[in-house]
Image (spheres, coloured by chain):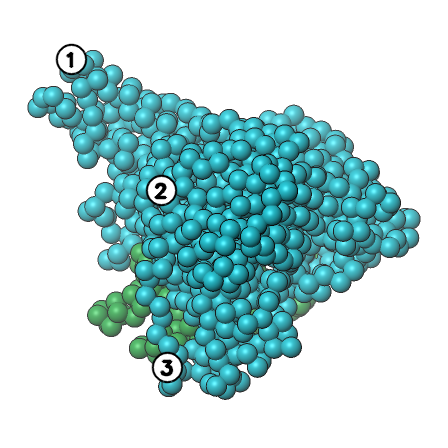
Chain colours: A cyan, B green
């Protein structure tokens, strides 16, 4: 009998490496991803997209496409019955381009046909005549008042400054630099896919879709379809990763519209190339920064100007900007700040959420600066960071006091305690050497470097947004059913939720009901928030059920319910001998409770960027060791050492998986991943040309999880999803600088940046 | 879609499947998933870069997105669905679960097939041989750490039980 399927003798409660309940289905190919769904008589849907970054649509001729046998419907902007636009914060993105296209890949029409190949032929037969306009692809130019407005909402999506303290203070030591971050893609493996099934008579639609936030999708889709919200019912289709790219709508409205139009089920699935066009990316950013410090290296003032290229539509740009400017001080004390931030509309592909959400960009700038400051003050990278490390109770440049546990210094010292990797062996396998099996690197050209990165990351949504989570718990005959709309994208809520129920209620059998919109919202699986928010909701619902169970046992056995507690799988009297198993105590009863977890309220920033805009914070340190072929510009990341502030470890193996996975994504941004744009056009929308870390690129990861339970968090645990990918990028960049002596103000660092 | 008039047979996991009314341009991945109901093999790049669609054709690990189905007639095709027998997981599948090698799971079937193939031809792979063998399979969630652990565990279990 296999280990994974045998009955476990230990109880899979919080703190244990409980195994994922979806594991067996996922390893055997039986797990249904949204792309695996089928319905009788279904048609395939596909999208026609703009080849131009900026153009006026003169005419669309569908006649040739309609003549193709097997084509059942073609829809354009005219066929959108409700709201013509959608968007997470501002509703500025057209469902289909209406008279104008603003980026390469903007949807113009969608077809439904009997076979994916028929769809491709139909798309090729649609004739669109364009009047090509000159694209505006530079954010600095786009934000000038005299520049043509790309969109009626204007080119400046948001401007926000942070002004605090002494605005004229000059430090004894001043360092500055301008840093650039390229456009990164989330590159989840499971391509966008959905199945839409129309209700008879076209009065509604049922959708199975891979998303991050079912209720937000439902709201946006129903508005565009002009249907009541409850007539658009969403069930989560299996999700093959997300990393922010599924927070915005992609094919949802098109798929639902085609289903209602044809009165047949529609399946849509993007190709990899279309996926690059069809979802938002990490914002490219240009950040100027100046630090003022004492000779001893104590930061006194920061100045920064941050420009985020939002691309053609707003998506979450305004929130990304706020994250960027409010994290630009890093995890360091600072009393005086002058910060100016801009999120700008251009004719580049739209940018929005990606793991790290604005903080990745800020961290690359502030950590590059910290190393410059260390050099200027004659301190080591560790010393400069310890000297300025933030602690709980410190005031941020926004005026917000850090109430979260803030073990910044401990993250640094524990990371520093991790042994360094062995030097490159003389007889190392070529595959272990930078350059790989081609024997390209000569040993005397390989230089080892070490670099540091430390970061602060907010958890949950900010600026007054109440991103609550809902969960329902039912207990009957010793079995718990949990119901919630929390999206599992791979992160492991599917294993955490039963662990919570087992811990609170003393049951072993926990069933998770279908994840759909037949219960209140759980908010998005993003912002490192689901363990805290949906975990809090499941915990709350289970606690309410436990209270009712105690009342029931108290009444039946004539004991004051306040004397009862759960011990393992029993209800026990903590002041006496009474003991009854939870199974027995719940036999013949049915207890149901629903709970909403809300985090504490937050505030908007005022015109000077002051306000308690964030809920809580998490911290992490990374130390990177790299080998660089200084002649060829090749890099191999050898080791990443990290200590992360996690609050409390709820599932060690799942937590480690988040840390290792995040590090690989941060490594990607440091040395290989970038969507290359030329006049608004992507040059590499494929996995052949957009390079992702493979098993041979994966460094050794040595991780320490710092457990100082967070009093604000329902389970004491902080979100752990985003921090791993944030400061690892500047740590790797710093290690390459250490090996090469080059400035390297831009990521990803390319071979030519090193060797030319 | 105007179908191909020829009917052809594919031998998948030891079973013969008749493919009718198919367009001749369909990839093996498409036919497995959409015509034979074997959706365990996944498509994620259509270019042979990500390995999500890995299957074994006549003893070779191949990307089924790059193979035309009609060229695989008479070949012996093995997919993720054909690995476990009687619902019993293989050592590799089991280790993926116990070592935390599964997150979103989209790359998992392709990786499991690639690793089974590696262990069939090399019972004692070194760390670097493991990395090389799966370097054609992209995983975006795990950073590969738990996957390396899973392979090591599977190697030990196979040695102990076979």
Chain letter behind tag 3 = A
Q: Earlier in the sequence, mark 1 or mark 3?
A: 3
Give the number of the disc on residue A643.
Answer: none
Q: Earlier in the sequence, mark 2 or mark 3?
A: 3
Quick one: B122 or A353, which is closer to the camera?
A353
Is residue A690 visible to the viewer in this orientation of the structure?
yes
Quick one: A461 or A12, which is closer to the camera?
A461
Is the residue marked by circle 2 packed among few (<14), some (14-19), or many (20+) residues within 10 Å? many
In the picture, measured across the screen, residue A125 lies left or right of residue A452, that is right
According to the picture, the residue beneath numbered tag 1 turns out to be A558
Q: Earlier in the sequence, mark 1 or mark 2?
A: 1
Discs 1, 2: same chain:
yes
Labels 1, 2: front one: 2
Disc 1 to disc 2, C-alpha distance: 40 Å
According to the picture, the residue beneath numbered tag 2 turns out to be A647
At 74% from the left and 32% from the top, the residue drawn is A83
Disc 2 to disc 3, C-alpha distance: 38 Å
Chain letter behind tag 2 = A
Disc 1 to disc 3, C-alpha distance: 73 Å
Is the residue marked by circle 1 packed among few (<14), some (14-19), or many (20+) residues within 10 Å? few
Residue A429 placed where, x, y %?
40, 82
């Amino acid at each position: 009998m296999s280990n994974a399927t045998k009955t476990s003798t230990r109880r899979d409660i919080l703190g244990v490496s409980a195994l994922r309940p979806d594991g067996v289905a996922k390893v055997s190919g039986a797990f249904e991803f949204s792309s695996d769904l089928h319905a009788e008589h279904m048609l395939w849907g596909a999208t026609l997209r703009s080849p131009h970054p900026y153009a006026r649509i003169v005419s669309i001729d569908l006649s040739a496409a309609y003549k193709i046998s097997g084509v059942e419907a073609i829809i354009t902007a005219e066929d959108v019955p409700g709201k013509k636009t959608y968007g997470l914060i501002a509703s500025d993105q057209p469902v289909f381009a209406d008279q104008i296209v603003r980026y390469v890949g903007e949807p113009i029409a969608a077809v439904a046909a009997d076979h994916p190949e028929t769809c491709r032929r139909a798309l090729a037969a649609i004739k669109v005549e364009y009047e090509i306009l000159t694209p505006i692809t530079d954010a600095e130019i786009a934000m000038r008042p005299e520049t043509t407005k790309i969109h009626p909402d204007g080119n400046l999506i948001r401007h926000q400054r942070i002004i605090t303290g002494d605005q004229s203070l000059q430090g004894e030591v001043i360092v500055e630099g301008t840093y650039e971050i390229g456009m990164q893609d989330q590159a989840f493996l499971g391509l966008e896919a959905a199945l839409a099934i129309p209700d008879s008579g076209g009065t509604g639609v049922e959708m199975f879709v891979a998303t991050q936030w079912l209720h937000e999708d439902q709201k946006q889709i129903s508005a565009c379809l002009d249907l009541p919200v409850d007539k658009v019912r969403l069930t989560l289709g299996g999700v093959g990763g997300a990393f922010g790219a599924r927070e915005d709508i992609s094919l949802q409205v098109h798929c639902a519209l085609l289903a209602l139009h044809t009165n047949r089920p529609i399946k849509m699935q993007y190709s990899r190339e279309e996926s690059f066009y069809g979802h938002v990316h990490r914002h490219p950013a240009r950040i100027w920064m100046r630090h003022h410090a004492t000779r001893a290296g104590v930061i006194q003032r920061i100045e920064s100007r941050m420009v985020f290229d939002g691309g053609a539509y707003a998506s979450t740009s305004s929130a990304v900007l706020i994250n960027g400017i409010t994290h630009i001080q890093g995890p360091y004390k600072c009393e005086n700040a002058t910060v100016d931030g801009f999120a700008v509309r251009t004719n580049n592909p739209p940018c929005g959420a990606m793991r790290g959400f604005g903080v990745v960009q800020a961290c690359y700038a502030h950590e590059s600066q910290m190393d410059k400051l260390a050099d200027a003050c004659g301190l080591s990278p560790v010393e400069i960071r310890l000297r300025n490390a933030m602690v709980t109770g410190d005031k941020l440049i926004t005026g917000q006091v850090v109430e979260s546990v803030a073990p910044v210094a401990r993250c640094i010292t524990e990371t520093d305690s991790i042994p360094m990797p062995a030097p490159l062996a003389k007889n190392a396998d070529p595959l272990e050497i930078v350059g790989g099996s081609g024997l390209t690197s000569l040993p005397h050209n390989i230089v080892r470097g070490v670099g540091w990165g430390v970061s602060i990351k907010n958890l949950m949504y900010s600026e007054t947004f109440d991103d609550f989570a809902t969960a329902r718990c039912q207990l009957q005959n010793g079995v718990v059913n949990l119901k919630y709309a929390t999206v599992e994208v791979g992160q492991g809520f599917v294993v955490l939720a039963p662990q919570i129920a087992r811990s609170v209620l003393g049951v072993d059998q926990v069933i998770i009901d279908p994840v759909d919109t037949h219960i209140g919202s759980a908010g998005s699986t993003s912002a490192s928030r689901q363990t805290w928010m949906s975990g809090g909701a499941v915990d709350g619902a289970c606690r309410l059920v436990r209270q009712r169970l105690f009342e029931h046992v108290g009444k039946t056995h004539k004991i004051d319910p306040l004397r009862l507690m759960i011990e393992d799988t029993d209800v026990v009297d903590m002041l006496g001998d009474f003991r009854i198993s939870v199974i027995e105590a719940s036999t013949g009863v049915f207890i149901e409770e629903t709970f909403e977890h809300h985090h504490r309220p937050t505030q908007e920033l005022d015109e000077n960027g002051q306000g308690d805009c964030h809920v809580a914070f998490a911290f992490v340190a990374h130390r990177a060791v790299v080998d660089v072929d200084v002649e060829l510009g090749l890099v191999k990341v050898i080791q990443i050492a990290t200590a992360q502030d996690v609050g409390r470890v709820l599932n060690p193996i799942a937590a480690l998986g988040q840390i290792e996975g995040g590090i690989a994504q941060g490594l990607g941004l440091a040395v290989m991943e970038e969507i290359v744009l030329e006049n608004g056009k992507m040059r590499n929308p494929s996995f052949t040309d957009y390079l992702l870390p493979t098993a041979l690129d994966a460094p050794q990861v040595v991780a320490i999880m710092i457990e100082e339970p967070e009093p604000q968090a329902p389970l004491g645990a902080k979100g752990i999803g985003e921090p791993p990918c944030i400061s690892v990028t500047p740590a790797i960049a710093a290690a390459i600088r250490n090996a090469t002596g080059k400035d390297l103000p831009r990521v990803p660092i390319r071979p030519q940046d090193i060797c030319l | 879609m105007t179908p191909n008039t020829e009917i052809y047979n594919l031998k998948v996991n030891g079973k013969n499947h008749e493919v009718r009314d198919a367009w001749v341009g369909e990839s093996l991945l498409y036919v497995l998933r959409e015509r034979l109901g074997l959706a365990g093999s996944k498509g994620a790049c259509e270019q042979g870069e990500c390995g999500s669609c890995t299957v074994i054709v006549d003893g070779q690990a191949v990307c089924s997105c790059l193979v035309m189905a009609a060229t695989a007639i008479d070949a012996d095709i093995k997919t993720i669905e054909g690995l476990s027998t009687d619902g019993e997981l293989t050592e590799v599948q089991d280790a993926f679960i116990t070592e935390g090698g599964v997150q979103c799971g989209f790359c998992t079937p392709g990786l499991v097939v690639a690793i089974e193939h590696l262990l069939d031809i090399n019972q004692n792979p070194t760390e670097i041989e493991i990395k090389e063998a799966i370097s054609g399979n992209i995983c975006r969630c795990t950073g590969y750490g738990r996957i390396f652990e899973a392979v090591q565990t599977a190697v030990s279990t196979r040695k102990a039980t076979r």
